[in-house]
Amino acid sequence: MRNGLRLWLQELPEQGRKNLQLLENYLLAIEFMKFDALFITFTTAGAVTNGKIPHNLGYKPLDVFTTRMTGNITFNYDLFDDKFLDITTTGAASFRGLIGRYKETQ
């Protein structure tokens, strides 16, 4: 899919490529659009220590944006890696939210 998109972009006239660049710049100016994120949800039935939650982002997420959480969940940021989050809970818990990385303007 990415290669097809790359070929399609190469076939656009120069003005079309410039317009897409302007659109990308506009979207990057919107703060929330700078967040490269994945929506995840998980539930634990009881207490968990250093539980691994798969995300497969391919990079270590630095940010967790919670939309809903029940129970007590600690995100062990220093133990995150490019495939898993690491959490600790004191009992049953659930989480819905976004994980990823906020991108600074270049």
Image (cartoon, rainbow, N blue to C red):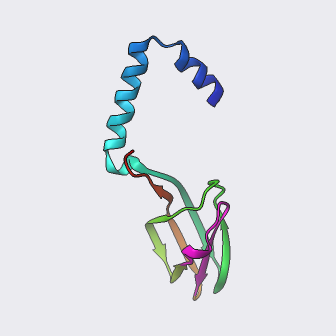
Q: On the picture, is 14 further left or further right than 76? A: left
In the image: residue 15, left or right of residue 92:
left
Spot occupied by residue 18 in the image (x, y as percentages of width and height): 38, 21
> Where in the figure is residue 53, as x and y percent of width and height?
65, 68
Q: Residue at x 51, y 82 (%)?
A: 71
Is 41 on the left-hand or right-hand side of 49?
A: left
Name the spot of residue 85 as percent of width and height, x first. 62, 69
Quarter of the picture holding the C terminus: top left
Magenta-highlighted residues: 75-89
Q: Residue at x 57, y 77 (%)?
A: 76
Tell me if residue 37 comes above or below residue 3 in the rendering: below
Residue 55 drawn at (x, y percent): 63, 59
Image: 27 above or below 105: above
Q: Quadrant of residue 57?
A: bottom right
Q: Where is residue 78, by image quadrant? A: bottom right
Front in this rendered view, residue 15 or 106: 106
